[in-house]
Each structure stands twice: as C-alpha cells, then as structure tokens.
Image: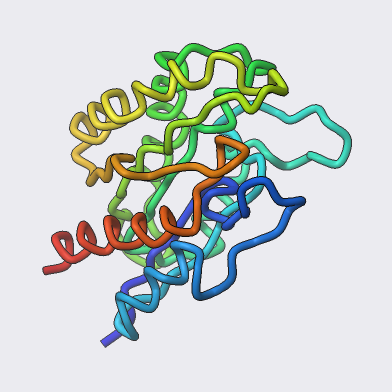
Amino acid sequence: MESIRILCYGDSNTWGYISGSNHLRYGNNERWTRLLAKKLGDNFEIIEEGLNSRTLISNDTRPGKEGKNGYEYLIPCLDTHDPIDLVIVMLGTNELKKAYNKTIEEIGEIFDKYIVKTILNRKSQFSEKYPKLLIVAPPLADDDGSGKYEGAFEKSLKFNEIYGKIAEKNKCFFVDNTGLETGIDKVHLTKESHTLLAEKIYSEICNIYQ
C-alpha cells in the first residue's frame, strides 16, 4: 500500500516560527507538522511547505523577501510534490498586515479564488485524481505595538466564519482556530498550540480516511 501523501502549505506558523524569537524554529518534536506525521504513522507522508512571511497574493517589498507570494508558488509546489492526496492549507495571516491594506472580506475572496480554487482544480500529472483540501483557519492575530498588524485582531475574529463558509461552498474539509493561542509577538503559535493543532488536524484526517 502506498502512503497517503499530504502537503502542508502555509506560512511561518506551518514552518514552526517560535514566537518572539529571531527566526528560530520549533523542532521535530514540537511543530505541528512533525507531530502530525508521528500521530498518523507510516501509512501517511507529510510534506512540509511552510514559508515565513508567505502571503496569499501580495508581494513583500522588503529587501531579501522575494518569493513570498503564495499564489505564484502554489502550482509549481503542487506539481513538484505530485501525486498529492490531500492539501492542508493555513494561509491569510500575513495578508492582515497594515501594509497590504485588505479587509477580511477581501482576504476571504482572494483565498477562495487564488488558493482554494487552484488546489482543487490542479489535476495530477500522473492520473485523473485531484487533491482533497483541508482548510485550517489561521489563529487570531494582533499588533504587538509596532503597528505592523494594526487592526488585525478585529479582522482575524472572522477567520472561522469566512473560511468555514469557503470550505462549505467548495466541499472542503475544515478545522477552526478554537483554542489556538499565539505567543509574545501575538502572531506565532505557542508550543502548546502546535500540539493542539496537530491533534485537531489528526482528528479531521481520521474522519477523512476512516
């Protein structure tokens, strides 16, 4: 039996960024992607595709921040790891940044059009299969006083509602952000939240492949 291949596509909270650190990463026994892999066992293969500062469609203009546009890399990523049975996507936090000036409704529309539709319509190069999609609502985000995420908290309060509706409309699977807490920088998940997220996603995958 071939392993069920699962692509985890996201930003720094999929990469495992430690809140308040200078680009330090949670280890294999701490970040949710590796914890999920251990819980699922040998019949599943977890492919980590988390990138710090990854957006939905916005281009990061800061020096050295090229390649952060999640949509531009999505098709090459899907084709690189083909065949893929399931994509887990948790994206949208970076689009909350004040610099990108988007409402949560606009973020939802962009997520649906450019990320969700692209994944669901990308047929395998080797068969007639299309990947299943599990949408994870990003955690609540807030500004740490720097102004970078000014107004983000009120917007992120609607992630569950908006992403949940997108999942329902597109007949996708969905995991909400209930219980997921961020650390000192108010954006990145705590170690405990990585554990909780792995458990929440594991439970949903068990429902998908029961």
- Classify 52 as above or below 160: below
Tell me where residue 73 sits by quadrant: top right
Tell me where residue 87 sits by quadrant: bottom left
Give the residue at x 31% y 44%: 179
Q: Is residue 166 left or right of residue 99?
A: left
Q: Position of residue 165 (x, y in %)?
A: 23, 27
Give the residue at x 61% y 16%: 150
Q: Is residue 166 left or right of residue 23?
A: left
- Classify 206 as above or below 169: below
Residue, far right: 63
Q: What's the coloring here?
A: rainbow
Give the residue at x 38% y 78%: 38
- Classify 22 as above or below 148: below
Q: Is residue 99 left or right of residue 123?
A: right
Foreground residue, 195 or 9? 195
Q: Is residue 28 left or right of residue 123?
A: right
Tell me where residue 118 sits by quadrant: top left
Foreground residue, 131 or 23? 23
Label tally: 0
Q: Position of residue 52 (x, y in %)?
A: 66, 47
Q: Position of residue 201 (x, y in %)?
A: 29, 57
Report the quarter where the C terminus lies.
Answer: bottom left
Report the quarter where the N terminus lies.
Answer: bottom left
Q: Position of residue 80 (x, y in %)?
A: 56, 62
Give the residue at x 61% y 22%: 149
